Image: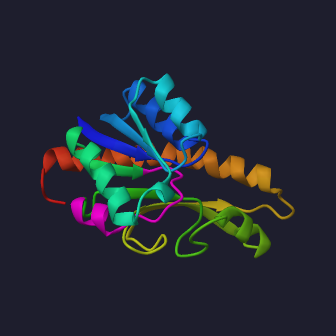
Amino acid sequence: MTRIAVFASGNGSNLQALIDAIGQGKLRAEIKLVVSDRPDCHALQRARSAGIAVLAFEPADFRDKAHYEGVIAEELAKSRVEYLVLAGYMRLIGSTLLQLYPRRIINIHPSLLPHFPGKDAIGRALAAGAAETGVTVHYVDEGIDTGPVIAQERIAVVPGEGRADLEQKIHAVEHRLYPQVLRQIFQEEEKWPGVR
């Protein structure tokens, strides 16, 4: 069973989708730790309710990103975490974690990358009058949503559609797609350990 850490900064709905998928036997993984840069975010409440250990502190309390990620890395090592799964984590991953987890850090983003990377992808898609948007699961590199794409799903933007309706459609796809893609990745890992 693949040992993962989930990184989240906000509501944690994608974290909850992963917790549910594991509980339903749809994803062979164990969430060893939930990491957050926002100690008061709702994702941590979801984690605690599920009996998952949490690690949360303000990055500003550390002298630099390397020190901040070094503390996280120590905790990941203690739990023998194999993959980092970003689920609404609003910070760029730095070189410390990228070097420790090459091609083992995965993110989900609410657009069809390379369109609308970074923050407020849904709002920017609406403002641009995009006919479609979607969801992308990708590996993380040093850029902002620039890593290799693993999977995408398109979502039509209905003319005149409001933000709340589009967000609801995107979340529904995210909550289905993320566990599905992770399951495929982890199954390959079990068949061919160490290949990635």
Name which residue lies at 39% across and 50% down. 85
Name which residue lies at 69% across and 62% down. 122
Is residue 91 shown above or below 71?
A: below
Does the segment drawn in magenta span residue 95? Answer: yes
Residue 26 percent location from the top left of the image? 38, 32
Quadrant the N terminus occupies: top left
On the picture, is 157 further left or further right than 64?
right
Name which residue lies at 73% across and 65% down. 123
Q: Is residue 131 visible?
A: no
Quarter location, residue 175: top right
Q: Is residue 195 visible?
A: yes
Q: Nearer the viewer, residue 156 or 128?
A: 128
Residue 19 percent location from the top left of the image? 45, 32
Q: Nearer the viewer, residue 85 or 168?
A: 85
Name which residue lies at 36% across and 27% down. 25
Magenta range: 86-100
- Number of labels in the image equals 0
Residue 62 percent location from the top left of the image? 42, 58
On the picture, is 8 further left or further right than 123?
left
Is residue 124 shown above or below 151?
A: below
Q: Nearer the viewer, residue 68 or 104?
A: 68
